[in-house]
Image (spheres, grey):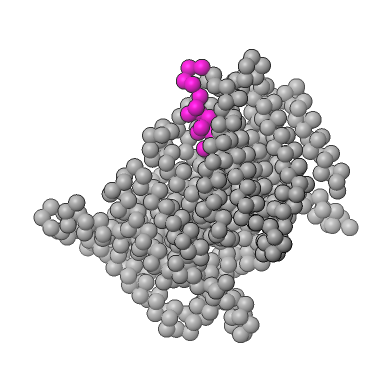
Amino acid sequence: MDFATFLVQCLNAVQYGLLLFLLASGLTLIFGIMGVINLAHGSFYMIGAYMAFVLAPYFAGQFLLMLLVGVVLSAIFGYVLEWAFFSYLYQREHLQQVLMTWALILVFEEVRSLAVGNDVHGVSVPAWLSGSVPLGELMTYPVYRLFASAACIVIALAMYWVVNRTRLGMMIRAGASNRDMVRGLGIDIRHLYRVVFAGGVALAALAGMIAAPMSSVYPGMGGSVLIICFVVVVIGGIGSITGALVASLLVGFVDTFGKVFFAEYSGIGIYLLMAVILVWRPEGLLSARRA
Amino acid sequence: MKARETIVPLFAALLLAAGPLFLTNYQQDLVVKVMVLSVFALSLELLVGMTGLVSLGHAAFFGIGAYVTVLASPEYDPGSVAVLLPLAMAAAAAYALVVGALTLRTRGVYFIMVTLAFAQMAYFVFHDTKVGGGSDGIFLNIRPTLGNWLDLASRVHMFYAALVALVATYGFLALVRRSRFGHALAGIRVNEQRMRAAGFRTFGYKLAAFTLAGALAGLAGFLMAANDAAVNPELLSWHESGAVLLMIILGGLGHLRGAVLGAAAFTLLKEALSNHGIVGAAADHWQLTLGVTIIVFVALLPQGLIGLPARLARARS
């Protein structure tokens, strides 16, 4: 493998890892703070991708505006969904949450099929991002993928700022490490839950919108990504955003280079990684919760 | 209470035994499917309901049992049940022993995820390599037989084979529950720390339960392969692991009847909601109706379907 190929694979790995991070950070917070196992998180990714497909004709040439509108819409959707459905799950056992959010996946998939059908769609890359940059003598790298990585980094930095530097972030961190204490200190936990949930949905939908021009938009795209997100969350440690970032990049690299070196067994790679890490550290790399 | 635990299953088994006399072919096939999935659900109930270990990778053992059955069958002759059945169960148990030894040190959500990881590894081995025909799976040319008196290619024979397997599994697990081993598992479910303080080596008990559950899932896999005469990697997928978990939660955890009830309810509900004759045009959108039905069921019946009579009695008084 020459250096240019190696570089391209590294860029792919980082880009994939960062995209996973957008999904997994929301999932890990919902999991860590509300204690809800949300199997429907992959559906938000699917909804985001379909939103990109539906919104694209209305925002020709204004891709960033479209992303913004999509984020606002999905945050509102998440806020309402928490109020209407998820707020009833907190009192229930984990297994019932699994059952109900699994049923929710079925509902979302069917509603999606009623609304936009079951065809595979493509979303075109916006014109100003459609070129590619040369790498070495033979290789090129699409600009859009660089944009995707950059966008994810910007969002990750913004999230870092919110979580570590604002009052809301303080409450989120406190909620992830000790929920009951936060409630005891008189913080309106229900409002916090709603905001965190809306944020998680918006991040997952944004990941879907960013991914849409790179992969096609297809039914069931939420299911495959969901399991990988859970792998990331568990490797990173539940409730830890830093852990999610480390784990996302780790999974991105293992998956990308696994496909290069062991094409036939590439699917096993990340699960092997997870098994090894959990046998070594049963609580994940950086768990927010103190046992 | 005791009467209900023995009389209801016995009555149900007798009713099923008379099934081929009055059921149509379509209904018989459906009942066989329910019985096979009931064995599968019972094997998971041993882990989740009796020991408190929530596994999201149970389909791996089911799928391995099914694959071994097909792979070990001769190509142009019927395989022998006496060879294939123990082989399928042993292979599933062997993988369960390895997975259990590695995963039982983790707890709670982490245990759920590591069991999923090992199931996904098995899934990708069958999906991505040529071991078992890749993503298309393989066909079983001739269904297994046992001497001259059992031929699983016959619908009636398959029906009774599944029934015998279901009754045997049910009876075996009912005995396990009453045994010293079963009480130890119940103790682990309630409070593992205390069991260890009382001098039990809980790891060994959990590993034994995990391996046993794997073997029983292998039995269900064998029946599945014999009934469908084909296997594909989807048998090992996390959807299947999720579905069987849903069955036992839907039925009611902590009761063997719950597992069977859940398997039947889930299979029949899916069948009914996707049947044009029953629900009309809504059958095209069975996922929506199934999803909403499950949400309503769980919201109203946290104890599962098995809690329905108690719930109704409470509503009446």
**Mostly what secondary structure, the magenta segment?**
helix
At x 37% / y 55%, what residue is drawn?
A53
Q: Is residue A27 left or right of residue A143?
A: right
Using the image as rendered, state which of residue B190 and residue A233 is in the foreground. B190
Taking the view exactly as shown, the residue that stands out farthest to the right is B317
Q: Residue at x 51, y 63 (%)?
A: A282
The single residue placed furthest to the left in the displayed view is A137
On screen, residue B169 versus residue A137, left or right, reads right
Across and down, in percent, residue B78 comes to 54, 19
State left or right for residue B57 relative to residue B35. Answer: left
Extent of the magenta region: B64-77
Residue A55 occupies quadrant: bottom left
**Residue A85 in magenta stretch:** no
Q: Measured from the top left, where is residue B29 in percent x and y?
A: 64, 28
> Would you say A210 lies left or right of B118 here?
left
Q: Is residue A179 above or below residue A253?
A: below
Q: Position of residue A146 (x, y in %)?
A: 25, 63
* Residue B256 visible (yes or no): yes
In this rendered view, identify the residue nearer to me: A40 or A79. A40
Q: Is residue A131 above or below residue B81?
A: below
Q: Quadrant of residue A58?
A: bottom left
Name which residue lies at 78% across and 51% down: B308
